[in-house]
């Protein structure tokens, strides 16, 4: 079997998908990053290898997410792309004709406007984390409910309580007040979903023309309460694609396919990457008062990448090799 | 008397050149760094913008090197910057750091007003010499701008990543070291040779993107997380709406130098969207977006410090400009964060968008 690997290394989760040549997703993995991107990717690749038939041939690899550069170097990627492009590519592949992508992940949220299959505009949350997955996570655990139940409970609320959604800190204290006044949990949760959607549309989606079909993806799309709140606010049906929580990885695999279609052989180092030893080290450069923390990645004892320096002194020392990746 | 001033990109080259030409002792603050920012943040009001915090840091670090007089620009109008020199001086006084403060405010009517303020620093030196020094400082600013503009063209086309940055640094140093106008002419020629020697594929087509917005965050690379460099690495040719020599000519010389691009070209085309002064460079920012769209640029990026009122006014108008002209515009707000990953992600996605749009257009026309 032949196909493509897509790896999305985000702040909260690391997702890996395997896609066959006809772009069907055959396997997908959703792992917690736990602050150790390289180890997580190695673990994921090992798991992927065991799930795929032994004669599998990887024709290309794509990486995305905030850990894309690092993972790209470790795995040997053919396409290293930012998550906005990756998400847009995946959405327009799975939902042809999509015009708006709402994406809410662990630490960030974004909106992507597509016209004629091409990204026409986008925005990402800048200075505010209210409305992202980790805030919902935190509130769920404060109320002692499993995050999986959050959405269903919110759906049961028929009189959503008004909650200040502009800032995560305001939202939390407002929720506590409403709780103490005796509102029931379902209505508070429904109110929270509405507040977050309002904040998202005002903050991330401000000034954007939201036209259907609308796709909602990212980890938070699992929350049916959020989906309903979006539908109510927008007045349009909101679709949730089948692979909503691994869309970045799907996009990365599609981009890898595109990259190798130009006839270049893949740079993938093979699943054996999972067994190699990677060591990250760091040192403080004392060349100027910035005292940059320079990070080094070594593969089997040999330095393969450096980054973290503002001036580029260390990063460009390996530039010739980086250009090859 | 040892004179210092805040950093704003390569402005130090021009100011140092001008003051040293008059035989005045100059202390250039150490380049903006994490330490500068930490010192500034610690002693500034939380709600002030990034430029003020970096200024304070610069002054504290310059004092450590023996500076006793601050020379700083002021301004008038609703932007807070007009008061910064005075506010900063008060903060420094509270810290028991006493400086003499000389504020170079743009003349309201006549260039003579500026000369009067300059007298405070130049003392009894003959006017002719002062004017020569001003001219020399201006020539240095022009030389630096010329070199920077070269780097914008070369960086996206360089063959080995980082070579343009090194050549740029060397070229600026050459200009910085020149002590007389004759030496400056020679240094500039030499600097251009250094830039020309960067191995690059000069014919390679590159997307053109304009950097527009607030002057400090445009000019000081520490405050904009090296945005020009990152765009260059992504293969994009940058044009900066605000260059130092242009600003000096527009605001301090009242446009006495002819044949230099002026911000008037932006104001003229801003009018369908915004036709009066909103403080700072808000009006110019709106106008520059229109102007660059007319010049056929692929996109524009607005940079501003967090809490900058004039630029927020402009930001809310830019979507309309973008809609009418068809040129995508992205806004980036700068504050204390020094992590580059978030910035790079946004830049990359924006450039992807421009690239795909460009390809579509090519396909339609061919």
Image (spheres, rainbow, N blue to C red):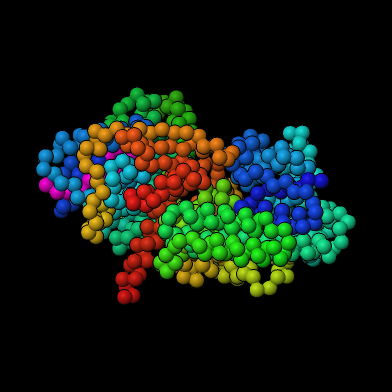
- Relative to B355, is B300 on the left or the right? right
The residue range painted magenta reads A1-15
Along the line of sight, the residue nearer the viewer: B70 or A275: A275
- Relative to A235, is B280 on the left or the right? right
In the rendered image, residue B316, in percent from the top left (x then y), is placed at 52, 56
In the rendered image, residue B294, in percent from the top left (x then y), is placed at 50, 71
- Residue B65 lies in the magenta-colored region: no
Q: Is residue A80 above or below residue B329?
A: above
The image quadrant of residue B117 is bottom right
- Relative to B357, is A310 on the left or the right? right
Q: Is residue B333 above or below residue B143?
A: above
Q: Is residue B55 above or below residue B311?
A: above
Residue at the spot 37% in from the left edge and 57% down from the top edge: B352
Residue at the spot 59% in from the left edge and 51% down from the top edge: B220
Q: Is residue B155 visible?
A: yes
Main SS, magenta residues: strand
Along the line of sight, the residue nearer the viewer: B273 or B147: B147
Q: Is residue A116 above or below residue B19?
A: below
């Amino acid at each position: 079997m032949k196909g493509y690997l897509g790896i999305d290394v985000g702040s909260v989760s690391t997702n890996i998908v395997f896609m066959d040549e006809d772009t069907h997703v055959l396997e997908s993995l959703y792992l917690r990053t736990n602050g150790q991107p390289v180890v997580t990717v190695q673990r994921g690749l090992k798991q992927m290898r065991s799930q795929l038939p032994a004669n599998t041939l990887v024709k290309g690899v794509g990486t995305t997410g905030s850990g894309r550069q690092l993972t790209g170097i470790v795995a040997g990627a053919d396409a290293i792309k930012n998550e906005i492009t990756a998400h847009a590519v995946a959405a327009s592949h799975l939902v042809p004709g999509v015009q708006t992508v709402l994406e809410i992940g662990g630490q960030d949220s974004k909106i992507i406007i597509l016209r004629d299959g091409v990204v026409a505009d986008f925005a990402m949350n800048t200075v505010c984390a209210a409305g992202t997955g980790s805030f919902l996570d935190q509130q769920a655990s404060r109320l002692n409910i499993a995050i999986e139940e959050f959405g269903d409970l919110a759906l049961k609320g028929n009189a959503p309580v008004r909650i200040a959604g502009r800032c995560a800190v305001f939202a939390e204290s407002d929720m506590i007040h409403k709780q103490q006044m005796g509102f029931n949990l379902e209505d508070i949760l429904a109110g929270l979903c509405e507040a977050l959607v309002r904040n998202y549309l005002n903050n991330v989606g401000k000034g954007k023309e939201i036209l259907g079909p609308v796709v909602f993806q990212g980890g938070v799309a699992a929350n049916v309460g959020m989906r309903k709140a979006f539908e109510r606010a927008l007045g349009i049906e909101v679709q949730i694609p089948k692979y909503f929580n691994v869309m970045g990885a799907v996009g990365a695999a599609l981009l890898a396919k595109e990259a190798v279609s130009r006839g270049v052989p893949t740079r993938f180092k093979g699943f054996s990457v999972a067994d190699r030893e990677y060591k990250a080290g760091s040192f403080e450069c004392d060349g100027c008062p910035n005292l940059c923390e320079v990070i080094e990645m070594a593969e089997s004892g040999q330095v393969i990448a450096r980054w973290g320096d503002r001036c580029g002194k260390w990063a460009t020392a390996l530039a010739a090799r980086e250009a090859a990746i | 008397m040892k004179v210092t001033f805040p950093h704003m990109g390569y402005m130090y080259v021009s100011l140092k050149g001008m003051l040293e030409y008059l035989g005045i002792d100059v202390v250039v603050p150490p380049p903006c760094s994490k330490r500068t920012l930490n010192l500034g943040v610690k002693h500034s009001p939380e709600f002030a913008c990034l430029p003020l915090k970096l200024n304070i840091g610069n002054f504290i670090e310059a004092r450590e090197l023996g500076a006793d007089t601050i020379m700083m620009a002021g301004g008038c109008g609703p932007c807070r910057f007009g008061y910064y020199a005075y506010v900063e001086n008060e903060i420094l006084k509270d810290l028991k750091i006493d400086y003499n403060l000389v504020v170079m405010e743009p003349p309201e009517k006549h260039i003579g007003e500026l000369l009067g303020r300059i007298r405070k620093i130049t003392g009894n030196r003959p006017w002719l010499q002062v004017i020569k020094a001003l001219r020399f400082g201006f020539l240095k600013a022009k030389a630096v701008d010329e070199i920077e503009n070269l780097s914008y063209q070369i960086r996206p086309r360089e063959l080995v990543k980082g070579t343009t940055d090194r050549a740029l640094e060397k070229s600026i140093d050459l200009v910085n070291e020149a002590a007389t106008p004759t030496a400056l002419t020679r240094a500039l020629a030499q600097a251009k040779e250094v830039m020309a020697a960067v191995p690059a594929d000069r014919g390679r087509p590159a997307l053109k993107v304009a950097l527009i917005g607030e002057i400090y965050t445009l000019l000081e690379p520490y405050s904009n997380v090296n945005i020009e460099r990152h765009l260059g690495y992504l293969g994009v040719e940058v044009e900066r709406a605000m260059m130092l020599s242009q600003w000096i000519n527009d605001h301090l010389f009242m446009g006495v130098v002819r044949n230099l691009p002026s911000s008037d070209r932006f104001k003229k085309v801003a009018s369908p969207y915004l036709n009066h002064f909103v403080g700072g460079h808000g009006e110019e920012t709106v106008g520059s977006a229109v102007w660059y769209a007319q010049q056929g640029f692929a996109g524009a990026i607005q940079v501003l410090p967090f809490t900058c009122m004039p630029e927020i006014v402009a930001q809310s108008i830019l979507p309309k400009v973008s809609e009418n002209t068809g040129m995508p515009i992205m806004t980036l707000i700068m504050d204390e964060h020094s992590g580059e990953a978030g910035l790079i992600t946004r830049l990359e996605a924006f450039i992807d968008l421009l690239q795909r749009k460009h390809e579509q257009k090519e396909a339609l026309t061919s």
